[in-house]
């Protein structure tokens, strides 16, 4: 995932402007990895990083190309889905839920 230094807010503003100009819609999803600090204290930072990377890689593989994932802080992430309809967004949410549940 990209981090905030990669101009997340500029990118998000561009997506919103593009949607306004073209009459399209999109989605902005956020999620957190619960108990990440506990995982770090029980195991270590490297284990938690590996766990997060595995989860994010699985999500990105499931979503395909038309999205951008950002790490907002240690345990909070955002996914921007430009030009995504409500139906497409709901399908993506189900895919993400399936990945997280595994």
Image (cartoon, grey):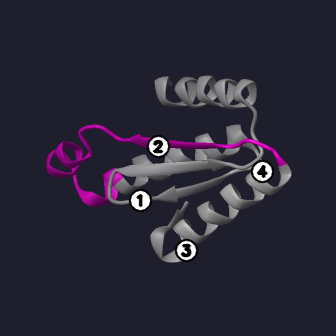
Whole-angstrom CA distance, mark 1 to mark 4, is 20 Å
Question: Of marks 1 and 3, which one's residue comes earlier in the chain?
Answer: 3
Whole-angstrom CA distance, mark 1 to mark 3, is 11 Å
Q: CB atoms at circles 4 and 3 under 8 Å apart?
A: no
Looking at this view, is 52 or 82 the one in front? 82
Which quarter of the rendering shows the N terminus? Answer: bottom right
Callout 3 environment at 10 Å: few (<14), some (14 to 19), or many (20+)?
few
Q: Position of residue 29 (x, y in %)?
A: 53, 41
Look at discs 4 and 3 and give the one toward the viewer.
3
* Element carrying mark 1: loop
User: Position of 53 compared to 82: left or right?
Assistant: left
Q: Which residue is mark 3?
A: 7
Task: Establish if 34 lies above or below 81.
Answer: above
Q: Position of residue 63 (x, y in %)?
A: 70, 40
Q: CB atoms at circles 2 and 1 under 8 Å apart?
A: yes
Question: Of marks 3 and 2, which one's residue comes earlier in the chain?
Answer: 3
Look at discs 2 and 4 and give the one toward the viewer.
2
Residue 89 location, quadrant: top right
Residue at horizontal 59 percent and vertical 28 percent from the top: 93
Residue 75 counted in the magenta span: no
Which label number is shown at residue 54? none
* Element carrying mark 2: strand
The span picked out in magenta is 23-48
Q: Which residue is mark 1?
A: 72
Residue at horizontal 77 percent and vertical 59 percent from the top: 18
Question: Of marks 2 and 1, which one's residue comes earlier in the chain?
Answer: 2
Whole-angstrom CA distance, mark 4 to mark 3, is 19 Å
Residue at horizontal 74 percent and vertical 29 percent from the top: 88
Q: Which residue is mark 2?
A: 30
């Amino acid at each position: 995932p990209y981090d905030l230094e990669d101009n997340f807010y500029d990118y998000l503003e561009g997506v919103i402007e593009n949607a306004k100009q073209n009459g399209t819609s999109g989605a902005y999803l956020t999620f957190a990895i619960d108990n990440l600090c506990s995982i770090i204290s029980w195991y270590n930072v490297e284990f938690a990083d590996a766990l997060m990377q595995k989860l994010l890689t699985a999500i990105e593989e499931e979503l395909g190309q038309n999205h951008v994932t950002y790490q907002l802080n240690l345990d909070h992430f955002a996914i921007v889905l430009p030009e995504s309809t409500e139906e497409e967004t709901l399908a993506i949410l189900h895919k993400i839920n399936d990945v997280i549940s595994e």
